[in-house]
Amino acid sequence: MNSENFKIIAVNSNNIQVEILDSTEFDDQFSLGSYIKIPYRNKNEQFAIGIIENYKIKNSESEDPQTAANQPTFVIDVKLVGNLDETSDDYKFERGVYGIPLPPQNGIALLTDDEIKKIYSSNLKEKEKFTFATISNNNSICVPVNGNKFFNKHFAIVGSTGSGKSHTVTKILQNAIQSKSGQYDGLNNSHIILFDIHGEYKTAFTNSNVIDINELVLPYWLLNSEELEELFLETEANDHNQRNVFKEAITNNKKSKFIGDKKEKDKIHYDSPLFFEIKEVIKYSKNRNNEKKQKDTNEVQWIDSKNNTIIFGNEDNDILFTELMKGLGTATGTLNGKLINFINRLESKINDKRLNFLLGEETRTATFSQCLKQFIGYTTDNSNITVIDLSGIPFEVLSITVSLISRILFEYGYYYKKMQKVESDCKTPLLLIYEEAHKYVPKSSLTKYRASKFAIEKIAKEGRKYGVTMGIISQRPSEISETIFSQCNNFIAMRLTNPDDQNYVKKLLPDTLGNLTDSLPTLKAGDALLIGESIILPSIVTIDRCNPEPSSADIDYFEIWKEKWFDVEFGDIITEWTK
Ligand SMILES: Nc1ncnc2c1ncn2[C@@H]1O[C@H](COP(=O)(O)OP(=O)(O)OP(=O)(O)O)[C@@H](O)[C@H]1O
Ligand SMILES: [Mg+2]
């Protein structure tokens, strides 16, 4: 269209208002997210680039009567995003603008498709390009991002239910595992761990390593002190007796099971990732609960079930672990009778079938290395993606499950780096995807979220350096810990209808493209605002369709309802339910 047809009517730092003088001359399409270019006064072929954030029809009464006839006149709000240099073949685009030429210059125009394509393609090296979307108002234009910058810092995908987050995650990961430099057979070297809270990704990654509650082996002895206490103690009760006995029993039991020299043994502490036998910890606690002492000497004494071992004091912890002892003496010991609730809790946990993945027999024989390998895809059939299906995990242990796995993966990155001769050498960068992240890293300070919050916040703050980054997916961004979000460098904001969430996202977006987020409630499923360090121009995009899809697609209610009455096999459902 005729470039003389645009007129700048207001400038306010990086926001400008442009009037379209005669919309009859307008033959190009423009919509939210379209780009315009404004020539700099004294710099040939250099332009300020802006993105249309908003438009309105001008109030014709107060304006020039000639344009008021029956043709609407538009005023568009434009956010300036960068500076384009068209002098060379490789259209150089930079973030930030030098200011707007005043008085406003003629020659303002919409960027053509070709120009947009050139900007995207010439500002990224071919090997860095990673593409999973097209411009939403022109699907013939692919929008590549810088693949290194996208994956080497954390990213977030937010949007209301049904906005297309799971499909977006799927598309991104499917493209990532298919990308190869050069020609070779077999897998590439991507390592992705997906925390799948609804069990919907199995169908999307057919060759992935899927671990559900029946296959998961997550030994309780790898839990750290916080996680152990969250699982076994009444954390809110703050009972020092329980905590002290528990800590003492675990530390001593780890030492007694340790095979190695004394110097190493002395270094063992409560948090050491070493085997201990939880059943012996229970025996120990029962013994301490029977504790009696001699009134005159204050000495604690026990006798074993065969009446032949008498121990004085606490010197011989090993014996306390193996035999059920009776307290002797003339007075009750300090702990006598005080540990009953605690022991009941321990016993009910180890008898809880649902916690077999954490406390069952297999967790005793599993090795640390097996446990680690299952999560990063080094299994019999190696795999780029490990889908951890959390759908069967009881809610009360969800936080420690996520925490333990996240922590193991972070520490893997940490120790692997420590071992490397060259500091920057990271052989297996990991990406951790947290679906429905508000469920385990909420703003809430409740103890039940403490473990997972702590572990994930640590990755948010330090993971990048050790090759452990994350993708945070959420339909309630305003409920997620701010520490997590503020560390994200790339955002895919999909349709968001809740005003709290919209405002929250608005504040967090790095490009201060505040008003663009006004379009968030109106986006179609699969459309998104793509913003961040990895993308050249902030863009409203349509995410490419994934194939195969996750099992999260909308249900065709009406069509299903119109079919003949369906006989449900209730027996099968009950079996599945109670298994
Ligand atoms: N790129 C796309 N183009 C068109 N439709 C899409 C696209 N991505 C997703 N959809 C459709 O949107 C619907 C919801 O997608 P999806 O399950 O990914 O949403 P979600 O944001 O993950 O929802 P929830 O928060 O409930 O998990 C699906 O039926 C899917 O087919
Ligand atoms: Mg989803």
Image: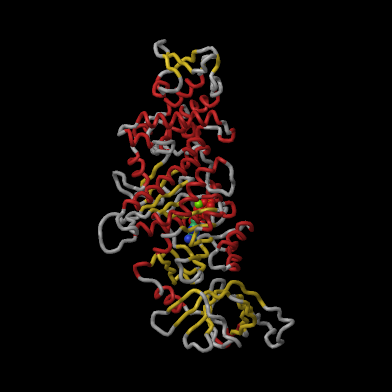
Single out the residue that lies furthest toward the right: 61
Instruction: Report the residue at 55% width, 76% height from top.
Output: 80
* Looking at the image, residue 162 lies above or below residue 360: below
Closer to the camera, 246 or 334? 334
Give the image's coloring scheme.
Answer: secondary structure
Residue 91 location, quadrant: bottom left
Instruction: Report the residue at 62% width, 85% height from top.
Output: 21
83 sits left or right of 429 in the view: right
Q: Position of residue 130 (x, y in %)?
A: 39, 65
Closer to the camera, 122 or 489? 489
Q: Position of residue 17 (x, y in %)?
A: 62, 78
Instruction: Report the residue at 52% width, 85% height from top.
Output: 39
Instruction: Report the residue at 37% width, 45% height from top.
Output: 375
- Residue 474 shows up from this direction: yes
- Residue 555 shows up from this direction: no
Single out the residue that lies furthest toward the left: 184
Single out the residue that lies furthest toward the front: 297
Count of marks, rendered view = 0
Q: Position of residue 156 (x, y in %)?
A: 50, 57
Closer to the camera, 425 or 300? 300
Q: Position of residue 366 (x, y in %)?
A: 34, 35
